[in-house]
Image (tube, rainbow, N blue to C red):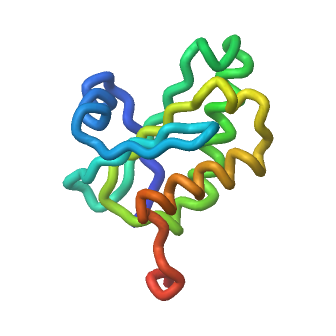
Amino acid sequence: MNEFKSLRKNWEFQSVYRNGKSKANRCFVMIIKKNDASSNRIGISVSKKVGNSIVRHRVTRVIREVMRLHWKEIKSGYDIVIVARPSAKESDYGKFESAIFHLLNLHHLLLEDDDLE
């Protein structure tokens, strides 16, 4: 089953930062690392450079929602860290979605149409 799990501990994030592959666009940096599990885990990092706590929480919620809605379209077995860049605060849901899909595509993490059940 491909349920939604989170990276929570600092050492989990550090492991992905140190050993993962990174791709970036205007809004986000996405770092991925193979894990030994059959499911993905996601970590979201939004620093104070992005904005105050209200802005940071909104950015986090929108990223989490985009990932939740498209969870079944992403290949399994990865730890994924998404780091928001300051330019993300001006974006809306549509921009977030296209930016995240752009990065998932660059990492070749999207399932092909024939892989989907």
**Above or below, 105 relative to 28:** below
Q: Nearer the viewer, residue 27 or 35?
A: 27
Point out residue 104 in the picture as x, y percentages from the top left corner: 50, 57
47 and 9: which is toward the camera: 47
Task: Please tell me which residue lies in front, 11 or 17.
Answer: 17
Residue under the point 53% across and 60% down:
71
Up-down: is 106 above or below 47?
below
Residue at coordinates 52% horizontally, 68% vertically from top-left?
73
Q: Is residue 33 left or right of residue 84?
A: left
In the picture shown, does residue 30 fall above or below 60? below
Residue 54 x/y as whole percent: 73, 17
| Residue at 50% from the left image edge and 84% from the top image edge | 117
User: What percent of the width, then of the height, locates residue 1?
Assistant: 39, 66
Residue 87 in percent (x, y) is at: 69, 29
How many badges with numbers are in the image? 0
Q: Is residue 106 left or right of residue 17?
A: right
